[in-house]
Amino acid sequence: MSTSSHQSNHVTSEAMASLEISSEKMTPVETRATMSLAAIYGLRMFGMFSILPIFAIYASSLPENPSPLMIGLALGAYGLTQALFQLPFGMASDKFGRKPMIYLGLAIFAIGSMVAALAPNIEVIILGRVIQGAGAVSAVVTALLADLTRDEHRTKAMAGIGATIGVAFALSLVGGPILNQWIGVPGIFALTALLTLAAIAMVKFVVPDPVNSHYHSDASAAPAKLKDVLKDVQLLRLNYGIFALHAAQMAMFVVVPFAITQSSDLGVNQHWHIYLPVLLASFVLMVPAIIYAEKQSKIKRVFVVAVAMMLVAQLMFAVSIDYFWGIVASLTIYFIAFNVLEASLPSIISKIAPAAAKGTAIGVYNTSQSLGVFVGGALGGYLSHVYGFSSVFIFCGVMMFLWLLLAFSMQSPPAVRTKMYSMDEAAELMTSEQALVLKAELAKLAGVIEAVVLPQERTVILKLDKSHDWDGSNLQTQVYQLLRG
C-alpha cells in the first residue's frame, strides 16, 4: 500500500474513531427542539388550513360578488410566493442565522394574515394571501431542526413534524367550520396572526439555540446540486405527483363547499359533520396500508393503488357532485388516497434521492407542492366559473391519469434505510482523497448500497439494504476495525 493510502487510512480512522453510537432515545434538548418546532409548524398550518372548507362560501358573499376565478386565486395565491421564497429563505438562513430568518418569515406571515383579516374585498384578501406565502419558513425550520438534532435521530424528528402537519390538517377541516360560526373568516385570519405571534414567542423562549449552524445535505438545498436533482427522472415523477396532489386538493375546496351546501340542508358551519367521520375513516384505513408498504417492501404497489384511488375519487366527484351522498363517498375515497400518498411521497423521496442531495430533492419537492396549490386554486376557480363544477374534477382526473401512468412505470423504490453518523472536528481536516478512500471502504461492506462521506459536515451517510440485520454499534465496530486493520 502506498504512503498516501496509509496516511488516508490513518486520518479517516482517527475521525471515525469518534463516531457516536446511536442511542435509543433523544436527549432532552433534542426532544424539546422537535416538539417545539413541530408545534410551530402546527400553529402555522392550522391557521392556513382552517379556511379551506369555508372560504369559498364566505368569499362569494362579499359585496362585489367575486367570480370563482378570484376565489380560487385567493385560496391558492400563497402557494406562488411560497414556492418563490421557500428555497431562498432556507439558503439565507445559512448566512444570517436560523432564528432571525424564522422571525422575519413568521412576521411577514402574520402581516399577511392581518391584511386578509381586515380586507374589504377579494383583491385585498389575495394580497394578504400573497404576503402570507412570502413568509416561507418551512425550509429554515427544517434546517434549524437539523442543527439541534444528532444525525441518527433526525429522521425521527422529521417524522414527528410530518405527523404534526397531518394532525393540524385534520383538525383544521373540523375546526374551521366551528370557528367560522364564532368569529367568521376574518376572525380566523386574525386568529392565524395571533397563533403566528405565539410561534415567534416559542422560537424565542422555547426552541433551543443551536450551538453550531451549518449546511446539512439531508435537510437543506444546495444550488450546486439543483441541476442533478432536476435531471433525475425518478424524482421528477414524484415532483409531478405532489404538484398534482395539491393542485387537486386546492381545486376541490373551490367547489366542494358550494356542492355540499347546494345538495343538502347543511350550512357551511355544519360541514364538519361530514369531514370528521370521513377523516376518521380515512386515517383508520390509511395506517394498515402504510405499515404493509414499509414492512413488506411493497411501497410501489400501495403507491400505485393510492394514485388509482385518487383517479377514481376525481371521476366520482365529476359524476356525483350534485348529489350529497355521492360527495360523501367521493370525499371518503379521496381522503384515504390523499393520506396514503401524503405519507408515502416523502418516504419514497428519501429512498430514491442521492444521499448527498436529499435536502435539495426535498426542497424541489416542496416547491412543486406549493406551485400545485397555486395552479389548483387558479384553474379550479376558472374552470368552475366557465364550465361548471364537473369540469374541475375532469381536469383533476386527467392529472391523476397522467400520474398513474408515471407511477406504473417508475422504478420500485429500493428497500433501504438510511443511517447517519457524526464525526468529530478532525474530519474537517480530511482531504478529498482521504474522503474517497473512506467512502470506497464503506461501500465494500455487505449490505451498504450507498456511502457518502461529508467531511465539512462531519457526517457519514449510509444507505443500507433492509434485508441485512444491521445494528448501529455493530456497524460502527465493523467500520472502525476495517479502517484500523
Image (cartoon, grey):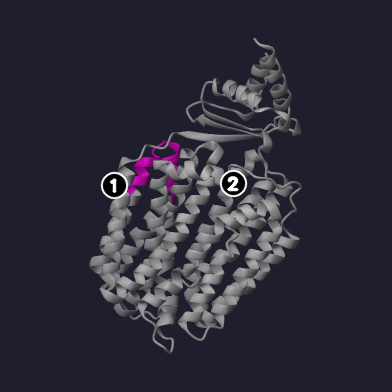
Task: Name the residue that disc number 2 marks.
Answer: 219
Give the labeled residue for mark 1.
405
| Residue 308 drawn at (x, y percent) | 30, 51
> Residue 438 sits in which quadrant?
top right
Classify mark 2: helix, strand or loop. Answer: loop
Question: Magenta segment, which residues?
Answer: 287-305
* Residue drawn at point x = 67 percent, y = 51 percent: 94
Q: Nearer the viewer, residue 170 or 80?
A: 80
The secondary structure that most of the magenta stretch takes on is: helix
**Residue 340 makes an appearance in the image:** no
How packed mark 1 is, by other alpha carbons closer than 10 Å (few <14, some 14-19, many 20 or more), is some
Q: Nearer the viewer, residue 205 or 386?
A: 386
Q: Quadrant of the C terminus?
A: top right
Mark 2 packing: few (<14 Cα in 10 Å), some, or many (20+)?
many
Q: Please, what is the three-letter code of the amino acid marked with disc 2?
A: Ala
Name of the residue lying farthest toward the left: 319
- Identify the mark nearer the N-term, 2 or 1: 2
452 is within the stretch colored magenta: no
- Residue appearing at x 67%, y 68% in the figure: 198
